[in-house]
Image (cartoon, helix red, strand yellow):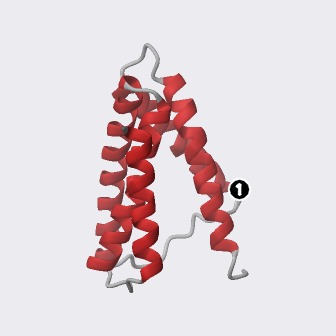
Amino acid sequence: MTQLNWFWFAVGSAFFAGLTAIFGKLGVEGLNSNLATFIRTIVIFFVITGIITMRNEWQLPEHIAARPLTFLILSGITTGLSWLCYYRALQLAPASWVAPIDKLSVVIAIILGVVILGEPISLKLIIGSILIVSGVLVLAL
């Protein structure tokens, strides 16, 4: 695996997240946003199940440590809460308003990475965060 693989996965993530906003907005028309989130979650379950099956990745380690498992559970809970909020926001406002505000998650992740994970802070990180917040404010106001 090359060092740039992470970059292409990140680009894929951004691309599919952009499509998610559009498809999600179209999907919540005339449908309860919580039910829409539930349907989305079931689809994700089947897609991931298919990928794991095709790649034969069903082998679990003999022992899963409590700490990683706890954080995966917490990540699942926060993902679900994020999706519920996102779909409700899409139901109430245009995707072009909701998606930029949702991207404040980038700045929140940077701050939490520095504070909780002890990741290094740099001038580039600060300037990038300010630019993201500025862009969101321009688009939201």
**Looking at the image, residue 134 lies above or below residue 81:** below
Q: How many numbered discs?
A: 1
Q: Quadrant of the C terminus?
A: top left
Q: Is residue 12 left or right of residue 113?
A: right
Q: Which residue is rendered at x = 60% and y = 39% of the image?
A: 19
**Looking at the image, residue 24 lies above or below residue 125:** above
Could you say where residue 17 lies in the image, as x and y percent from the top left?
55, 47
**Looking at the image, residue 1 lies above or below residue 47:** below
Q: Quadrant of residue 58?
A: bottom right
Could you say where residue 139 lies in the image, as x and y percent from the top left?
44, 41
Tell me, yes or no, if residue 91 can be seen here. Answer: yes
Could you say where residue 50 lies in the image, as x and y percent from the top left?
64, 49
Q: Which residue is rendered at x = 43% and y = 27% of the image?
A: 36
Q: Which residue is rendered at x = 45% and y = 27% of the image?
A: 94
Q: Nearer the viewer, residue 28 or 69?
A: 28
Could you say where residue 23 lies in the image, as x and y percent from the top left?
57, 31
| Mark 1 closeness class: few <14, some 14–19, many ≥20 residues within 10 Å | few
Residue carrying label 1: 54
Q: Amino acid at mark 1?
A: Met
Q: Secondary structure at mark 1?
A: helix
Q: Quadrant of the N terminus?
A: bottom right
Tell me, yes or no, if residue 102 can be seen here. Answer: no
The residue sitting at the top extreme is 30
